[in-house]
């Protein structure tokens, strides 16, 4: 059932074609498809294909970003229909991300946000120059599992420590995990400030977030 | 005694990476971008300046769209050549389009400790040690703040770095970490103290400042404000684009050149609007993104082409160029570092880029290695020798020597040989030992490099900074710290190094 439509949905993601993705979503709804089926068996299947091609070196980061953008276009069409049916898409976790106070660099942070979204995380992006309190308030508001803090400068990376500290002071640690990234960030720094992890690139950030969510579900596992 | 700098001068070999028509195409595309897409200037003062000169300014987005006449009219005020002053006047560097000066790289965050080899966070002491070693190398023309002094307070860190450099070298100092108004004011004051007077500071500025753009098509507010203060004081100031193909620039090289060019020439035009005639320079370190990780690669054929092409652009605008070379992504002083740093440095040098940044960092300008510092200096010496080309004078044609030896002889015991043999390049760190010796030996060439760095650090004493001058520098830095302590917080966003 709907195999042609599902195939078009998968292809739109693999091709990174946002117009085709939105069009297939509209066609699916008109044909009476369950939006959750469209997502899981159509679009997410396409994303998985892109992900496996990426891991084998057949596809590159821009392929992933185009796929993520197409996915977003499809979700924009499907979400109102999901709301009507009170259907809720399962998510892998809620992540609040932003660039620390005093720092306006966002390209790397945006890349991580897009990759996390595409990988099934609900991402709340606070933008750049974000005060410590805003990280804490947003994490509380949305019930974040993970807070991602970006800094590109040695002079602003101390803000990452402040976010870890503020979440502790608010009694939200260790439930809320903190991950850090940015050019000057090293493993030693992440350990020193008590963050739960760091990654040097966006793909690694998704793996890290996934690992943290899995660990939270199965705390006994070492 | 200052150790004389031996720069690449008037390369005999040259080539054209872009034809004049191709340069013009990049230039025209750039002006179209500047006029119709615009460049972001998130600084109140910069926006005021642009608006006052008739550019279209969006106060919400901070995007400036400037007509070509305005940009080109402003750039016409930029001096085509000027001097970078040194504490020791014999080490002044004329930026005259005929020389290529190498600097230390910057601004890293970690270092392989010179004694233990352990990878650790950088501190002020490292900045001082690197400046001291660089002071002794004839391949190094000036010191670029190599590492972040992370043990110093953020608001005065860049100034501590400058003090450490001036105390440990008599060469010119350039920094990329002065990114706020208070730091810029203090840096100008410190440059005046080192120069001796405001007049001397303007004639032979002992400091120059580079600011990073925010690719694509953006600037950083703090950097802009700092750059305008520096330009007004006659401190040579440049903007560096690090646009990266497929990431912060288009996937194509020409497109990335356009994006970076738009950032740099609008930045320089702003400075010329603020301070007509101010010494400014073009700076660039474009690269191609790693297609898998999105990371800055710092090596590869694209970088080598950018290294040569950017000088064609800087020449077109008649301003000096500071070009990123030696920017290897290698994690150790290995074959990758050798290939990337040799080719990037050759390509940037053969077109006579005025300044090369820089020597000593690994992992995409993040980790300092003293071994790599020495190996990079050797790469520079190889390129320097190569670009001197071949002398075909009568003496070099050596007909008398050839007659003297004739068929089947040898040239070993000849006065002509003794007179010229020292013109042949001599390696410090190439392993030219016989196989049998190499096989039994435990040392390898990189060990010799590190040993020399250690030796220089132990024995080399740069001409000291006058204690009174040194105390004055401390006074300025302390003043900034005092003011920062009373301020509500940082008012301006710092920019990338």
Image (cartoon, coloured by chain):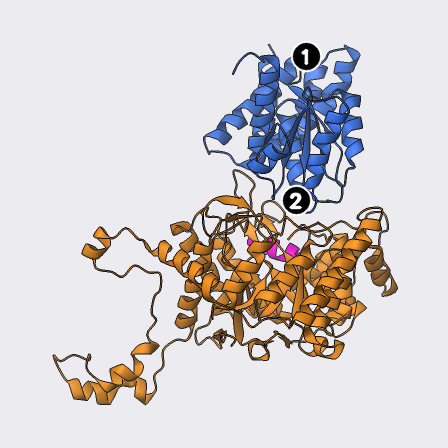
Chain colours: A blue, B orange
On the image, the x and y values in percent for residue B85 come to 63, 75
- Looking at the rendered structure, whether the residues under marks 1 and 2 are on a common chain is answered as yes
Assign the magenta stretch its main secondary structure.
helix
State yes or no: residue B390 in magenta.
no
The answer to which quarter of the image holds residue B289 is top right
Question: What residue lies at 56% left-to-right and 70% top-to-bottom?
Answer: B354
Q: CA distance from mark 1 to mark 2?
A: 45 Å
- What chain does mark 2 sit on? A
Q: Is residue B406 visible?
A: yes
The residue sitting at 62% across, 49% down in the picture is: B249
Q: Residue at x 30, y 53 (%)?
A: B443
> Which residue in the structure is indicated by mark 2?
A152
| SS state under label 1 | loop
Q: Which mark's residue is nearer the viewer, 1 or 2?
A: 2
Q: Which mark is residue A33?
A: 1
Indicate the position of residue B315 as horizontal and vertical percent values.
60, 71
Question: Which residues are the magenta region?
Answer: B253-260
- On the image, the x and y values in percent for residue A189 come to 60, 37
Mark 1 or mark 2, earlier in chain: 1
SS category of the residue bearing label 2 = loop
């Amino acid at each position: 059932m709907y195999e042609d439509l599902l195939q078009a949905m998968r292809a739109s993601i693999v091709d990174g074609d946002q117009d085709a993705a939105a069009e297939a979503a509209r066609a699916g709804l008109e044909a009476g498809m369950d939006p959750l089926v469209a997502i899981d068996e159509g679009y997410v299947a396409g994303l998985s294909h892109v992900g496996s091609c990426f891991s084998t070196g057949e596809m590159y980061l821009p392929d992933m970003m185009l796929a993520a953008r197409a996915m977003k276009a499809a979700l924009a069409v499907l979400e109102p229909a999901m709301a009507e049916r009170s259907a809720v898409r399962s998510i892998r976790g809620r992540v609040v991300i932003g660039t620390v106070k005093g720092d306006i660099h966002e390209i790397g942070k945006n890349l991580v946000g897009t990759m996390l979204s595409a990988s099934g995380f609900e991402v709340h992006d606070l933008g750049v120059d974000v005060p410590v309190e805003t990280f804490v308030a947003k994490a509380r508001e949305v019930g974040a599992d993970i807070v991602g803090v970006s800094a590109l400068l040695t002079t602003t990376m101390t803000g990452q420590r402040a976010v870890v500290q503020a979440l502790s002071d608010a009694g939200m640690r260790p439930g809320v995990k903190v991950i850090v990234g940015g050019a000057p960030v090293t493993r030693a720094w992440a350990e020193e400030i008590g963050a739960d992890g760091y990654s040097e690139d966006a793909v690694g950030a998704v793996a890290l977030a996934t690992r943290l969510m899995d660990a939270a579900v199965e705390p006994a596992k070492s | 005694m200052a150790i004389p700098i031996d720069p690449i001068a008037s390369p005999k070999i040259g080539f054209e990476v872009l034809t004049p028509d191709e340069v013009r195409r990049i230039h025209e595309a750039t002006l179209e971008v500047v006029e119709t897409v615009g460049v972001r200037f998130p600084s109140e003062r910069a926006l005021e300046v642009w608006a006052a000169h008739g550019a279209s300014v969006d106060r919400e987005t901070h995007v400036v769209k400037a007509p070509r006449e305005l940009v080109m009219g402003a750039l016409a005020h930029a001096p085509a050549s000027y001097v970078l002053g040194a504490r020791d006047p014999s080490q002044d560097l004329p930026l005259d389009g005929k020389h290529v000066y190498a600097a230390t790289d910057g601004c890293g965050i970690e270092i392989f400790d010179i004694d233990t080899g352990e990878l650790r966070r950088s501190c002020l002491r490292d900045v001082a040690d690197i400046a001291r070693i660089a002071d002794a190398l004839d391949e190094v023309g000036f010191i670029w703040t190599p590492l972040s002094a992370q043990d110093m307070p953020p608001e005065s860190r860049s100034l501590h770095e400058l003090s450490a450099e001036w105390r440990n070298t008599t060469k010119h100092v350039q920094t990329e970490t002065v990114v706020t108004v208070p730091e810029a004011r203090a840096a100008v004051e410190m440059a005046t103290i080192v120069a001796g007077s405001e007049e001397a500071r303007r004639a032979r500025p002992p400091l120059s400042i580079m600011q990073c753009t925010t690719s694509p098509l953006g600037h950083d507010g703090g950097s802009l404000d700092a750059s305008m203060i520096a330009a007004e004081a006659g401190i040579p100031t440049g903007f560096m684009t690090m646009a990266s193909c497929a990431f912060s620039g288009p996937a194509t090289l020409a497109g990335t050149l356009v994006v970076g060019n738009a950032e740099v020439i609008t930045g320089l035009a702003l400075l010329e609007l603020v301070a007509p005639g101010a010494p400014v320079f073009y700076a660039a370190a474009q690269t191609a993104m790693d297609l898998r990780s999105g990371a800055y690669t710092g090596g590869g054929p694209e970088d080598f082409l950018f290294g040569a092409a950017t000088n064609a652009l800087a020449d077109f605008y008649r301003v000096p160029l500071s070009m990123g070379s030696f920017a290897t992504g290698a994690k150790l002083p290995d074959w990758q570092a050798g290939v990337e740093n040799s080719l990037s440095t050759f390509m940037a040098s053969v077109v006579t880029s005025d300044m090369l940044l820089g020597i000593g960092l690994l992992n995409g300008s993040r980790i300092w290695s003293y071994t790599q510092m020495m190996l990079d200096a050797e790469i520079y010496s190889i390129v320097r020798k190569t670009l001197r080309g071949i002398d075909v004078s009568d003496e070099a044609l050596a007909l008398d020597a050839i007659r003297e030896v004739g068929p089947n002889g040898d040239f070993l015991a000849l006065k002509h040989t003794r007179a010229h043999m020292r013109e042949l390049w001599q390696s410090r760190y190439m392993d030219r030992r016989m196989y049998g010796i190499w096989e039994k030996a435990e040392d390898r060439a990189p060990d010799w490099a590190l040993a020399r760095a250690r030796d220089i650090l132990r024995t080399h004493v740069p001409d000291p900074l006058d204690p009174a001058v040194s105390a004055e520098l401390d006074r300025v830095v302390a003043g900034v710290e005092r003011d920062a302590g009373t301020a509500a917080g940082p008012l301006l966003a710092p920019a990338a190094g």
